[in-house]
Image (tube, coloured by chain):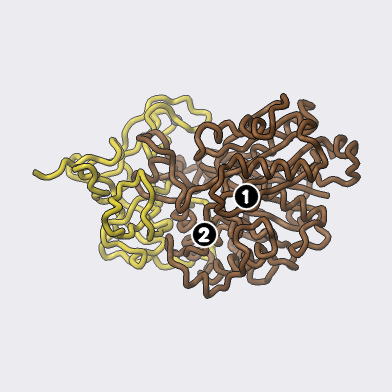
């Protein structure tokens, strides 16, 4: 019998309708989008909204930055200390429509050598780990096939963007 | 200028991995600060402890813990927690008590006995805690965040791994001259390059270690300082205390995502420069008036970021400032003459207090080999969880 598949966190992503998407929420009063989802109240100052509707986030975005984890992270990261550590890639992705940056692990096989700032990536379903006989599912970012780095975005010194802005 | 408080005394416990409890380190640092002030413990009217969360109960009521360890004498006690900014918040609390007339002499203590390796969140199943979630879902350690920013600097500004290594070389050389520092040996660029990658592009020697350590200050009103015979005390002229404005667009630990900006709205000002800007405004001086700066070099790349956020140079020019030698000892604006966290390591509630200890010794001309000649004004800057931060300006 195959292990039960459970999302590592409930309600953050879905594959309903066949398409895998991250799920955020959107304030009905002011339109602010939240990921991770905010269900109780809107955090925009000056907005008293308490009605938040679930919304799928953009499937694609551009790499804001990336790194990897060469050492095993401590608990609660699900990782069996008996097994060899394989570094994961961590990718911060800028979603144009939402104007936000969302972190996620890279899909299996995606290393820092495959990435560049500005490159287009898409969200795909992934497996985080096996834990207590269960398969923990998650989201991964993966370069869009056929996409290279976007010219002019790797070394944008002429426009002097300020780090810290999701420009 | 109104609103100033005096540094009556400063003290530290040497940083390292000593295998003792945080109460012992903090008490020794407190006694050193009291001795430096020439005050008996019984003369202290208030104790503000910067909390440590890894030591359970006593760590979370640090004010009372240190008051008990020093001997109950009836002083007012306060405990504050703000992660890496805890020490600065403790100083700010002490300052508010002094300026309001609530207390004349206040002891501020921060101390930690840190675990080896990565800082991890508190245990248990706590999916409502963003700090727990980033480890659980992503394995995103603190160095992973430092690396995201370092990589971004490389892409935007052309910073190189060699630039980052230069920060370590500079700070290790300074730390070698500081008897309180944990690491007392010079480091070469080759040694940085040969150390293992922790989170690409950062290597082990680019990232500060976890340490045991403690720092303490005795603060008082300027009148109290004069009464104690201090004609020209070091004075704290500003303690900034700002938070970001919504939508926050900088991805800082422990966030999994930034705020989303409403469609069509202007991109808000980046937050980090506002930490120092508020301190400059309060102090009535600017970056051109500084003799030195103590910044949180949690990673080498992050130190370069602070040069820009402190206004020592324009955005993107941090590495250039470093290469010119401006931030080295003898340069125009030495940064981290103490050796920085690169030489001390992280003892979370102590480090923002340790920064002010260094300013105090530098401004008094007591820094020995690492003295910045004629130091008149200094700034510190730090950041705690969720990216909120503080900056302290001291003058003499
Ligand atoms: Zn709203």
Near-viewer residue (A10 or A18): A10
Instruction: Please state if B180 lies on the left or on the right of B155 as rendered.
Output: right
Q: Is residue A157 or residue A132 the one in the foreground?
A: A132
Q: Nearer the viewer, residue B194 or B303?
A: B194
- For mark 1, name the chain: B
Ligand 1 appears in which quadrant?
top left
Query: Which of the 4 image quadrants contains residue A70?
Result: bottom left
Q: Is residue B269 visible?
A: no
Residue occupying the far bottom of the picture: B190
In the rendered image of this protein, which colour is used for chain B?
A: brown
A36 versus B163 height, above or below: above
Horizontal placement of A20 versus A157: left or right?
left
Q: Provide the chain ID for the residue under circle 2.
A: B
Q: Is residue B367 left or right of residue A113?
A: right
Marks 1 and 2 share the same chain: yes
Which chain identifier belongs to the yellow chain?
A
What residue is disc 1 on?
B273
| Point 33% across, 66% down: residue | A114
Label 2 beta carbon less than 8 Å to ligand 1: no
Q: Residue at coordinates 68% horizontally, 41% vertically from top-left?
A: B240
Which of marks 2 and 1 precedes in the sequence?
2
Q: Position of residue A79 (x, y in %)?
A: 30, 50
Instruction: Name which residue lies at 31% across and 33% down.
Output: A54
The residue identified by callout 2 is B207
Q: Residue at x 16, y 40 (%)?
A: A4
Camera-side mark, 1 or 2: 2
Q: Compute the Cα span from label 1 to label 2.
A: 22 Å
Quadrant housing residue B84 = top right
Please tell me whether residue B169 is drawn above or below residue B303 in the rendered image: below
A85 lies above or below B110: below
Label 2: element kind: loop
- Quadrant (top left/top right/bottom left/bottom right) for the N terminus of chain A: top left
């Amino acid at each position: 019998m195959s292990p039960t598949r459970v999302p590592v966190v409930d309600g953050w992503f879905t594959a309903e309708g066949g398409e895998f998407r991250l799920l955020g929420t959107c304030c009905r009063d002011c339109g602010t989008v939240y990921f991770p989802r905010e269900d109780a109240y809107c955090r925009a100052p000056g907005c008293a909204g308490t009605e938040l509707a679930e919304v799928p986030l953009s499937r694609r975005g551009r790499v804001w930055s990336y790194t990897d984890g060469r050492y095993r992270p401590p608990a609660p990261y699900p990782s069996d200390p008996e097994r060899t550590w394989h570094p994961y890639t961590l990718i911060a992705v800028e979603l144009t429509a939402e104007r936000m940056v969302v972190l996620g692990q890279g899909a299996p096989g995606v290393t820092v050598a495959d990435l560049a700032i500005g490159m287009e990536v898409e969200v795909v379903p992934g497996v985080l780990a096996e834990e207590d006989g269960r398969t923990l599912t998650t989201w991964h970012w993966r370069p869009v096939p056929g996409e290279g780095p976007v010219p002019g975005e790797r070394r944008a010194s002429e426009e002097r963007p300020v780090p810290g802005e999701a420009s | 200028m109104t609103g100033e408080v005096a540094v009556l005394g400063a003290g530290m416990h040497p940083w390292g991995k000593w295998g003792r409890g945080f109460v012992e380190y903090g008490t020794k640092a407190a006694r050193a600060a009291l001795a430096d002030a020439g005050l008996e413990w019984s003369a202290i009217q208030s104790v503000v402890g910067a909390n440590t969360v890894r030591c359970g109960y006593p760590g979370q009521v640090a004010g009372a813990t240190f008051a008990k360890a020093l001997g109950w004498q009836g002083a007012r006690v306060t405990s504050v927690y703000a992660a890496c900014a805890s020490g600065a918040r403790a100083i700010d609390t002490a300052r508010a008590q002094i300026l309001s007339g609530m207390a004349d002499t206040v002891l501020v203590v921060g101390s930690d006995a840190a675990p080896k390796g990565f800082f991890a969140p508190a245990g248990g199943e706590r999916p409502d805690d963003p700090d727990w979630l980033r480890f659980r879902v992503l394995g995103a350690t603190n160095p992973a965040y430092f690396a995201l920013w370092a990589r971004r600097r490389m892409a935007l500004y052309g910073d190189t791994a060699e630039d980052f290594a230069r920060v370590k070389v500079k700070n290790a050389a300074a730390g070698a001259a500081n008897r309180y520092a944990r690491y007392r040996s010079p480091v070469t660029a080759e040694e940085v390059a040969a150390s293992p990658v922790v989170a690409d592009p950062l290597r082990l020697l680019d990232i500060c270690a976890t340490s045991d350590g403690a720092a303490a200050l005795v603060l008082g009103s300027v009148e109290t300082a004069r009464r104690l015979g201090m004609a020209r005390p070091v004075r704290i002229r500003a303690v900034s205390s700002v938070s970001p404005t919504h939508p926050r667009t900088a991805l800082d630990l422990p966030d999994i995502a930034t705020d989303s900006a409403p469609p069509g709205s202007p991109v808000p000002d980046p937050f980090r420069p506002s930490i120092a800007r508020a301190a400059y405004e309060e102090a009535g001086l600017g970056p051109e008036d500084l003799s030195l700066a103590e910044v949180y070099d949690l990673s080498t790349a992050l130190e370069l970021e602070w040069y820009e956020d402190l206004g020592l140079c324009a955005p993107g020019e941090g590495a250039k400032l470093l290469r010119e030698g401006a931030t080295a000892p003898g340069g125009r604006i030495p940064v981290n003459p103490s050796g920085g966290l690169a030489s001390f390591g992280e003892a979370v509630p102590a480090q923002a207090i340790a920064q002010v200890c260094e300013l105090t010794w530098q401004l008094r001309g007591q820094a020995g080999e690492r003295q910045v000649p004629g130091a008149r004004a200094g700034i510190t800057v730090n950041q705690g969880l969720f990216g909120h931060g503080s900056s302290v300006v001291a003058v003499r």
